[in-house]
Image (tube, helix red, strand yellow):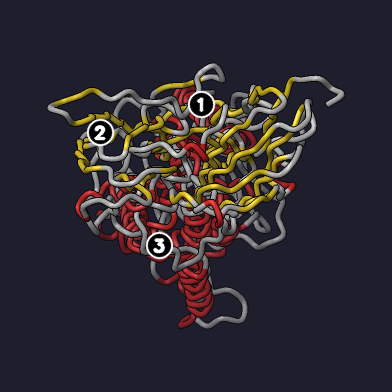
Amino acid sequence: MLIQPFDIFVHVWLVLAVLSAAYVAWDQFTGNPEPAVMKWGFVLVTLYMGPIGLLLYVMADKEPRPGEHEAFIRPLWKQGVGSTVHCVAGDATGIIVAAVIVALIGLPMWQDLIIEYVAGFLFGLLIFQALFMRRMMGGTYLQNVRRSFLPELISMNCMMAGMAPVMVALMMGRDMRAMWPGEPLFWMVMSIGVIAGFAVAYPVNVWMVARGMKHGLMTERKENEEGNATKAPSTKAGANAGKRGAQPSPGSTGGDSAETAPMPGMDHSAMGKSAGSRMASKAPAKQAGEDSHASHGGSGNTPGDAMKSDVTRPQLFAVTTFTALMLLLGMTFPAAFYNLTLSAHDVGGAIMPPGMIMDNDTPAAAMLDMAAVDPRDVTQTYGLKVRGGRELQPRLENGVKVFDLETSVIRWQILPNIHVNAYAFNGQVPGPTLRFREGDRVRINVTNRLPETTTVHWHGLILPNVMDGPAHVTQEPIENGDIYRYEFTVVQSGTYFYHSHDHVDRQQALGLYGAMLIEPRIADSTLAADHEYTIQLQEWLMREGITYPAMPMEGGMPNYFTINGRAYPSTDTIHMKVGETVKVRFIGSNSGFIHPMHIHGGPFEVVARDGETLAPAARFRADTINIGPGQRYDVIWKALKPGKWMIHCHISHHTTNNNTETDGGGGLMMHIEVAGDPTT
């Protein structure tokens, strides 16, 4: 499922990577004349690096025309590509396999990096170098392990120095789906990491090829292939003197030279010829002045040629030490910015809102509470024709009024072209209105279908403590699929509401709230009105089609606002006549901001606050009332003049939709249309 716009590129890249690798495999094994280990190396690297791997293959290794492979691969930069490909193919395979296993186990990122390094190094050394190169290198397996150790260590240090910070930054940034192997983004990040590792390892591989420490690209032909093309052409161009391996480099002493012990891929004269196909091993003698890298395949000679290194021990020590420092920096630098104690089990799959501040001590719980609603959890989509806050009719069981609430993840439309992914009671935002009468015995069955636990708090009600709802305080949270039964006697009257009290920074902000309207035993005639309307306020954060819980902190600021689950101009209109009254019940069902709610066309009378009816002497007239989260006010407004009168929040930004206005406003805004004689 495509969740973010970038997912389109991710899927296209992964498809291209598979197609590119398939082409390289077909071309390598049907015609490109080189050893099997390099064929597999290019196939794997292209699979990991996608079109970039294909580009490297075509530009550096693919024989352009029959018989030209030896000359085509001669330049040192191409030899460096071949050496790096051989390194990356083995090391990246070990790294990726380790990354998958560690993610599935759930180890923290800092352990992940260490295990990936060890796995990549061992796989590259023991499999791709010592084992797969044994036929070309000659000697025993253990001898080849010893010969390959330092070149593999140097190359692996550079590769992981480039790969580690890139992987951490992309995996533990905004979109942490990249931490989980079941997500396509994980494989995209692996690909980007391998590309970065290749780029960092390439210069040192060029140096090692030039110094005779590693093989570059090679040509391997059958005896009957291309006739005379089995002989590698000689090279007379080059700035460096040939036969470096025969004597120490200028200025060095015999004791300082590292060439006294064979380096990887050096003397292969003892390599046997396979039955049915004999390797071309008669390359022409190297000329004085030939490129130094010609001794290890730079001239296109066969893998049977001898190769010796002219690297001095001080040079080897300096390069090894420097790459070790690169590795240390690459492995530890991310710890300054990311919490490496977290694992894929902790936050894998979470998408953070733009602008959220995350550092090396941000806990997993904070990330999960601010994370986007996963669109794959949505069970139902509702359009503008479906209203929220519909009154829920109870059923009677032995004199008890029974209500059934069920939580779920839905897609809820707030404007003609705007949906939010919401948490909902009974598939509506706000949840169903529960209407009680003072003295009722009620039972509310709450079934949880969310991807996380939840509870319900009955805001402002006097009831037994065990029924109050705070998670881990008065009850254990309701697990997915479980039911919790709340039962109590209603002893109050007035305007109240219910909301989630688990993951409180998240669930109420995503829509888990609803009105409770409790009628008194004895009606108060002074509170009577011709019409009644309940306003439940909410803030939403929706970016790039993804919904996050809105909250007053960096990255959590809302950009949409709703009255009863709709933003203006999709909000309701109250229809009245001149002289009629309407009781408006304001409910601060939102969880982040104070909203000064204002009614045009004349003042209203505040008759109740937080469910408590004000004594006649305490009632007061106003035209704006501040509604804070959790607060409720009942006001009675009289239509004095005909026309279209607004109800809106007096924070101007809260009457916009994503910072824009439509038909004069947006967000927390609705109309009262009063009919009557326009002259009155």
Q: Which residue carries the number 3 mark? A: 363
- Foreground of the two, 273 or 175: 175
Q: Residue at x 38, y 57 (%)?
A: 365
Discs 3, 1 touching: Cβ within 8 Å? no
* Camera-side residue of 1 and 181: 1
Earlier-in-chain disc, 3 versus 2: 3
User: What amino acid type is highlighted by mark number 2?
Assistant: Thr
In front: label 3 or label 1: 3
The three-letter code of the residue at mark 3 reads Pro
- Which quarter shows the C terminus? top right
Rendering coords of residue 86 (x, y %): 45, 47
Q: Secondary structure at mark 1?
A: helix
Mark 3 vs mark 2: give the one in front. 2
- Which circle marks residue 15 in the picture? 1
**Residue furthest to the right:** 679
Residue extending furthest left? 398
Residue 92 badge = none
In the displayed structure, 531 sits above or below 623; it is above
Q: Residue at x 65, y 63 (%)?
A: 241
- As rendered, which of 4 and 621 lies closer to the eye? 621
State which quadrant residue 453 falls in.
Answer: top left
Q: Mark 2 and 1 residues: CB-CB less than 8 Å, in contact?
A: no
Q: Is residue 285 among the parts visible in the rendering?
A: no
Q: Position of residue 418 (x, y in %)?
A: 61, 28
Q: In this figure, which residue is indicated by the disc labeled 2?
A: 447
Q: In front: 35, or 176? A: 176
Left or right side of 80 for 603: right
Where is residue 575? Give x, y as percent.
65, 22
